[in-house]
Image (cartoon, rainbow, N blue to C red):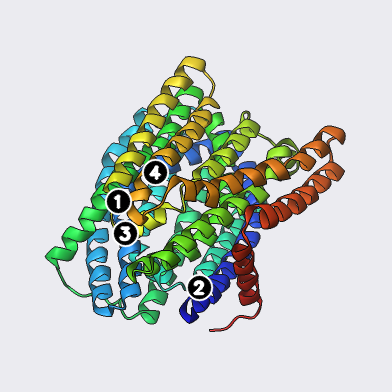
Amino acid sequence: MTGHSENTRRLARNTVYLYLRSFFALVISLYTSRLVLQALGVDDYGIYNAVGGFALMFWLVTGSLTSAVNRFLAYELGEGDREQMNKVFSMSLNMMIGFSLIVLLLAETAGVWYVSARMTIPEGRETAALYAFQAAAVTVMSGIVVSPFNSSIIAHEKMGIFAAISVVETVIKFIIALFLVYGPVTMDKLILYSALWMGATLLLQSFTIIYARVSFDECRFRKIFDRNLFKELFAYAGWNFMGSFAGTMSEQGINLAMNVLFGPVVNAARGVTNTVRNAVSMFVTNFTMALTPQITKAYASSDMDYTKSLAFRGSKFSFFIMFLISLPLLLETEFVLGVWLTEVPEHTVAFIRLALVISLADLLYMVLTYIQNASGKVRGLQIMMSSVTMLNFIVAYAAMKIFSKPEIAYVVAILASLLKTVFFIGILKKTIQLTVKELMTGIYLPELAVVLSSAVIPLAVCFLMPDGWVRFLVVGFACVICVGLSSLFIGCTRSERTYLVELVKSSIFKKG
């Protein structure tokens, strides 16, 4: 019990750090996106999102290995094996450097060809698009190399420094945007923005490496090759690669398909949508980021009851947080965009509403996957996830061509998330002996009850009041009160309310 109380205090402390970052980043990031859109214009903003998304496709080469490093470092920390942690770190750094060179080769061959020959780019902007792609590719490569250091910070639950780095990143991006709009800029703004953001990223990643090397003993590189560890890492990463590939094709592949079918203006709308979705999802991501190492460590120590408890509570609390933030945005999307942006790209309103629904649907299974990842038994999970995700991409692409409506891709993604939930329940039952009844009564029915009970009053306000600031404020207040009370008294059990009280107390009276 003492250990669990300490975990609760640490989770509360880390959540506070990350939420403070989220509130700061939400305001600054949204205003930054407005400035960047203003500085670049709709076409160049769409180009940047299209080529940047294409560059990120090369992350799939190592994204699966990054997931493996995160899991193995947290698992070994849970078992207390420092020597093995150093082996994991050294082996992973070796492999990341090797894969970064593969990414360089792919980017300079297939990447340059695709941007030059296949992407829909306005006449005269081809050179700027190539510069933006090169800057994005360098950023991806550096992120690959620094990922083992970042994984160590997360495994040790040092979320304070993680949040600080993110805040500095947000401020730098804001300063760059201000300079683009108000500074004495004479060169091409798309090229300049890409170069400045690349330089800022490299600077912050250098700090991450220095901090991890100074703070953690395992972040000391050794020339080592452990054949068994290599096989374990690649066995885990190999199946995750399938999921990484499918996820990248679904997200960035659809982004590229929209560029080919509808042009860069739709990419601009998708870029704005991703900014909003990422800003909202950040609040949930921060909570689960603090929670994931504890789930892995609890599983490593064979405390299955605590593992299940963390996953159930994390799943419900994540959904309630996301719904609390999403509901007012769903109801007031047009008003928020009108206040935020001087020029709203076509399709943005529908994109944002559908993207928020996708985020809520993803949370029906997302947190529970951390149990499966902690177990290391990811074969069935990744086969199922990647199959549904690839089906999502194929169906979305075909539907966009048939109906000539980019919004259809988001509708298909919602259906795919629901299908993943159904399939995942069957897989998870075998991992920790769960029943469908436990999942329904413990997670899904309380979430449904909160959605139905808390949306009535805010919807009534939208129908009865005219559009404007007064309605926006009233809707926001109604959403906070209704969702908050419904989550606490309808969505949570008595023990979960007690847990929340302890979590809040631990965040106020920080100990340990």
Inspect this view and state whether residue 127 appears: no
Tag 4 secondary structure: helix
The residue under label 4 is which amino acid type? Answer: Phe
**N-terminal-most mark, 4 or 2:** 2
Front: mark 4 or 2: 4
- Position of residue 297 relative to residue 183, above or below, is below
User: Alpha-carbon neighbours of circle 4 within 10 Å: few (<14), some, or many (≥20)?
Assistant: many
The residue that disc 2 covers is 161
Instruction: Kindly indicate whether the residue at mark 4 contacts the one at mark 3 (C-beta within 8 angstroms).
Output: no
Front: mark 1 or 2: 1
User: Alpha-carbon neighbours of circle 2 within 10 Å: few (<14), some, or many (≥20)?
Assistant: some
Relative image position of residue 128 (x, y in whole percent): 46, 40
Measure the alpha-carbon separation of dots 3 and 4: 15 Å
The residue that disc 1 covers is 378
Mark drawn on residue 329? none
**N-terminal-most mark, 1 or 2:** 2
The residue under label 3 is which amino acid type? Answer: Ser
Measure the alpha-carbon separation of dots 1 and 2: 30 Å
Left or right of 436: which side holds 59? left
Mark drawn on residue 375? 3
Instruction: Kindly indicate whether the residue at mark 2 contacts the one at mark 1 (C-beta within 8 angstroms).
Output: no
Quick one: which residue is furthest to the bottom in this view? 512
**N-terminal-most mark, 3 or 4:** 3
The residue under label 2 is which amino acid type? Answer: Ile
Measure the alpha-carbon separation of dots 3 and 2: 28 Å
**N-terminal-most mark, 3 or 2:** 2
Inspect this view and state whether residue 485 appears: yes
